[in-house]
Image (cartoon, rainbow, N blue to C red):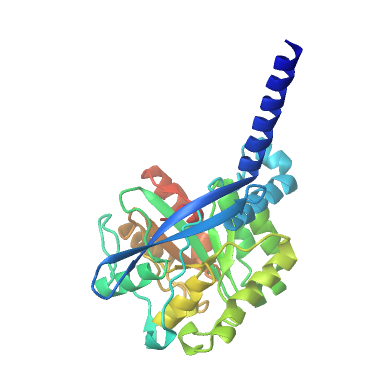
Amino acid sequence: MRKIILAGVALVMIFMLGFGAAAYYCTYRVKVSANSPDNKSNEKEIIYVKDEKKTNEKEEDIEDEILLYKNRNKDKVEDGKNEPPSVTPKDDFAPLTVDVSTLSIEKKSWYFNPKKNGVPSGAPEEIKVLIKKYRGYYLGNIEDKTIYLTFDEGYENGYTGKILDVLRENNVKAAFFVTTTYINDNKELIKRMTDEGHMVCNHSTTHRSMDTIKDEESFNRELLECEKNFEKVTGIKMPKYFRPPMGEYSELSLYYTQKLKYKTIFWSFAYGDYEPDSQPAPEYAKALIMERTHGGGIYLLHAISKTNIEILDWLIKEWKDKGFQFKSLYEIQ
């Protein structure tokens, strides 16, 4: 009887050791289809061995950002105010492998066709196909009454603090696209943006037209320097969302951007708010924005605009009264 009990214990121990090993390493089999010249599908099997102690790099970065936010703002988070981004996106990145010499270097400038009465802005079909190929967005889900509020920050004009005040008072989160110069000149504002749960995203280092950069190393430097300086100031990783300065790009620049695991963020609404000395009248701006409001819209406002800070509180409340909700770019698909 004693021998039987000992044998049973031994079997249990072997099973537990085997289960532990299986939990530590797991094998993922991915079927990859490659089309042959005669259009027949050839299957290759690629085996990945993944250490379960490590998580997906992209998810890990975002979780670190949320954790750091909570540690900095424990009291605020506990009372339900200024919640950090709650969505950890799946890593849907699948880098394209292309012959770079075949990509167009023709300069393109982003534009959209504004609509009224809740109809989403349009764009040429070939442009929509192009940006989608390289993980570019100008709209979210148009079936939802959702707004993605974004601000471009090339330099500080004295209004960003007030913008942050209004966003906090209305419990709205936004995305701020910043340059390297802006980061280094406005470190406290950058920290406040992250502390209050906003996304701080990449707007390049020198604010140049990205289509003019043909060399990949030089192109990468524009984004990576901005990342590095943001991390130095905040201690967290910069979200992988990029807005090309002036909305200027080429197929090659879109390719380089997605190769760095970035999504390119254009917009479905913008207006002439970017000249500090030639600001639109507040009532005109209110009427224009509401006339062109649509579901799934990515709204671009410039933080240097006096008009924008004058109308922002009214605008947010008006959108909410009409049933719109604000979402993070983390949620865009």
**Front-most of residues 91 and 254:** 91
Percent coordinates x, y for residue 65 in the rendering: 65, 53
Residue 269 lies, in percent from the top left, at: 38, 65
In which quadrant is the C terminus drawn? bottom left
| Horizontal relation, residue 303 to residue 156: left or right | left
State the residue at coordinates (62%, 63%): 238
Query: Where on the picture, by quarter, is residue 11?
Result: top right
- Which residue is more in the foreground, 140 or 10? 10
On screen, 272 above or below 20?
below
Residue 309 seen in the figure: yes
In the foreground, 136 or 217: 217
The residue shown at (39%, 47%) is: 324
Q: Position of residue 207 (x, y in %)?
A: 56, 81
**Above or below, comparing residue 78 to residue 310 in the picture:** above
Whether residue 89 can be seen here: no
Depicted 140 relative to depicted 1: above or below = below
Q: Residue at x 62, y 37 (%)?
A: 80
